[in-house]
Image (cartoon, grey):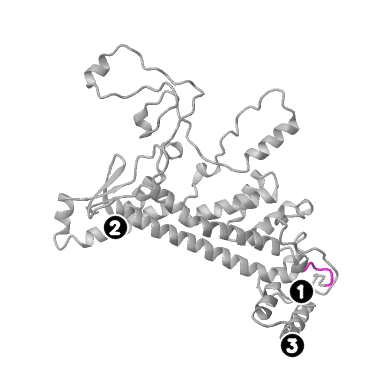
Amino acid sequence: EFGNILEVSLILVIAGDRDIEKEYDEIRKTLTPLADSARAEQATGFDPSGLGSWAEVEGFASEVGTSGNGISTENATTISDYSETETPKFTHQAHLGEADKVESLQLIFPNFREHTIKFVLKSSNGDLERAFDELLDRQFLHESGDLPKGIDGFYVPGDGSQSPRGKTKASRSRTNSRKNKLSLSYTVVSPTINDAELEGASGPSQLSKTTDRPVSSRMASSEPSPVTEPYDWQAITKRPAAARAITASATPDLEASRSNLRAAAALSRLGPLGRQGTVVYIDRAREAARLSLAKTAVMAERLVNQQSTASKIDLHGVTVLDGVRIAKHRVWQWWDNLGEARGRTARESGFTIITGVGHHSAGGVSRLRQAVGTALKNDGWRVEPLTGQFYITGRM
């Protein structure tokens, strides 16, 4: 009786703690005025979310009629008509033009500018599903401070590679579609690179072994070092357990944020009632993202505390955003504790911030090192760059 008008969750909340057989009439009396109010509100076309008339955009409402506000409430799809087991899809994307697709994505991702959404949509060949997944990843990376800037943010490995002979155009298209679902930056490692440059990396076969012989003995040896095969795999050491724990602690909240954003995208196409639920799911997604960042920050603080002293901090294993925040806070804490003669004391015994060189980063350059160095200079610190670290000797 009320399933087509009211949210199922609302009905369950009202009737869940009561004996339905004994209190059936009271439950019905409670739900009846709510249903009447929902019908009246639906008939007026009032939008309490403040998001505007989404149903006027083709594809967001199931039917567009000729009522006064351009929205057909008679044939509008309700929440009960939507199957919970169905994966949310942009089912009407074939009928949308580029401008409508951009507008649809802007409603779900208001933090991205129009040119960014257009670029992502173009790189996805106009596929709204792929563009939606890409924007989800970009939003999390943006909030966590890991979104690459400039040309690095648009680099996709393998774009210029030639396709093997004998493949038809259709098969190449399907292969490229599968490849573009996940874009990862990586560093191409030369097969003849020295083991010491990878800080613990080792090859699976015939890698040159570093021994404890004296330098003169090693240089005088005429036996050439064996070279790895061009197609051998390079086994890279795993991340520290503490660093992996930071990512693991934020994963549940990140998944909850993505799930809520997908639910919001699905509800936005279900008519007036769906738009009301969209606001709720978007708020939940943002709250889950905030919780994820908060947990990551707490774990980062614990990790830095374990591997730091009063005059030195080690930022290995933390994100760029947390690394910059911790570095700025700790250097000010060190400066305030130096006392009245802090200028002379800082020159004699400075403060060290370890960031790492960046051998394992994309392009061999540590984004954490770049961000921390820029932040320290902007704060007015006298910074001396060293190998894999910064040495602070006072204020400018």
Spatial CA distance of label 2 from label 3 is 61 Å
Query: Residue extending furthest top?
Result: 222
Q: Residue at x 76, y 55 (%)?
A: 91
N-terminal of the two: label 2 or label 1? 1
| Residue 360 falls in image quadrant | top left
Q: Residues within 10 Å of mark 1 (few under 14, many from 20)?
A: some
Q: Nearer the viewer, residue 213 or 26?
A: 26
Residue, disc 3: 29
Q: Residue at x 60, y 61 (%)?
A: 110
Query: Residue extending furthest right?
Result: 66
Please state the horizontal and vertical placement of residue 189, each as a whole percent of the image: 45, 30
Residue 208 shows up from this direction: yes
Residue 210 versus residue 14 in the image, above or below:
above
Q: Which mark is residue 330?
A: 2
Q: Amino acid at mark 3?
A: Lys
**SS of the residue under disc 2:** helix
Marks 1 and 3 close (CB-CB < 8 Å): no
Residue 116 shows up from this direction: no
Decide whether residue 6 is among the magenta residues. no
Q: Amino acid at mark 1?
A: Gly
| Residue 270 falls in image quadrant | bottom right
Q: Residues within 10 Å of mark 3 (few under 14, many from 20)?
A: few
Residue, disc 1: 3
Please state the horizontal and vertical placement of residue 307, each as a whole percent of the image: 29, 50
Q: Which mark is residue 391?
A: none
Left/right of residue 336 with respect to residue 372 in the rendered view: left
N-terminal of the two: label 1 or label 3? 1
Q: What are the residue bounds of the magenta stretch?
A: 74-78
